[in-house]
Image (cartoon, rainbow, N blue to C red):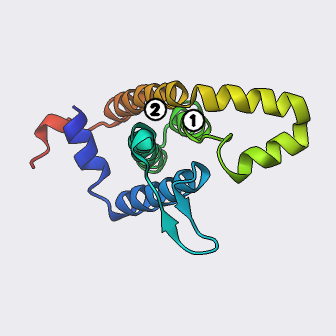
Amino acid sequence: MHKQTLKLVYSNISSWIISISLFSVLFVFMLYAREFLFFEPFFAFQLPVEWIPSFVLIIIVSGLIALVTSLAVFQMRTIKSNSRKTGTGIVGSAIGVGAGVCSSCGQIGFVIISTFGVAGATSLSFLSTYEIPIRLLAIAILSGTYFVMIKGITKGCKVDLNDVKS
């Protein structure tokens, strides 16, 4: 079921463009937010050994967000389902982005601390302490959203996917 649905979704070039561009933008943003990637004063990338799990989780979250978003766009365009069903993919992607980005890392954290004071510092301390579990939660949410989207596309499609030739 998943293989045929993904073939159907990615048979259109626009799905590939959406997925690749969204993955690239989110990947670079998350690397920058986590301070793996630097643009000033010169372009640099660093990956200390102890940060490899975080880097791998960033790749997984970016890929799942790109996949779920392309499925949601396909469902909106092709199946014309109601906004409640299609909203699952968009809400899942938004939650995944929110949980996947370490807002306590880098320049974003300083802005939040200076804006919200002690409350901001306390929340950022929590986020930095539980960064890996929060990213794992984002992956779980995005995986659940993926399965809901696949099920919705399969049910909404009037064509028997088993009859589609490879």
How far separated are the C-alphas under marks 1 and 2? 13 Å
The circle on residue 127 is none
> What kind of residue is marked 1?
Gly
Image coords of residue 73 (percent x, y): 47, 49
Residue extending farthest bottom:
42
Where does the N terminus fall, quadrant-wise? top left
**Can the viewer see residue 64 in this picture?**
no
Q: What element carries label 2?
A: helix
Say if 104 sits above or below 106 in the image. above
Secondary element under disc 1, as helix, strand or loop, is: helix
- Residue 128 coordinates in the image, percent (x, y): 63, 32
Nearest the viewer among 25 and 114 is: 114
Which circle, 1 or 2, is nearer the viewer?
Answer: 2
Q: In this view, does 57 lie above or below 13?
A: above
Compare residues 35 and 146 and report the one nearer the observer. Answer: 35
Residue shown at the point (50%, 29%) measured from the top left: 132
Horizontal and vertical percent position of residue 105: 65, 44
Specify the quadrant of the image occupied by residue 17: bottom left
Task: Count numbered badges in the picture.
Answer: 2
Which residue shows up at 43% across the image and 45% down it? 55
Q: Mark 1 points at which residue?
A: 87
Given residues 69 and 129, the one toward you in this image is 129
The answer to whether one can see residue 78 in this image is yes
Q: Is residue 77 above or below residue 130?
A: below
Q: Name the residue under label 2.
A: 142
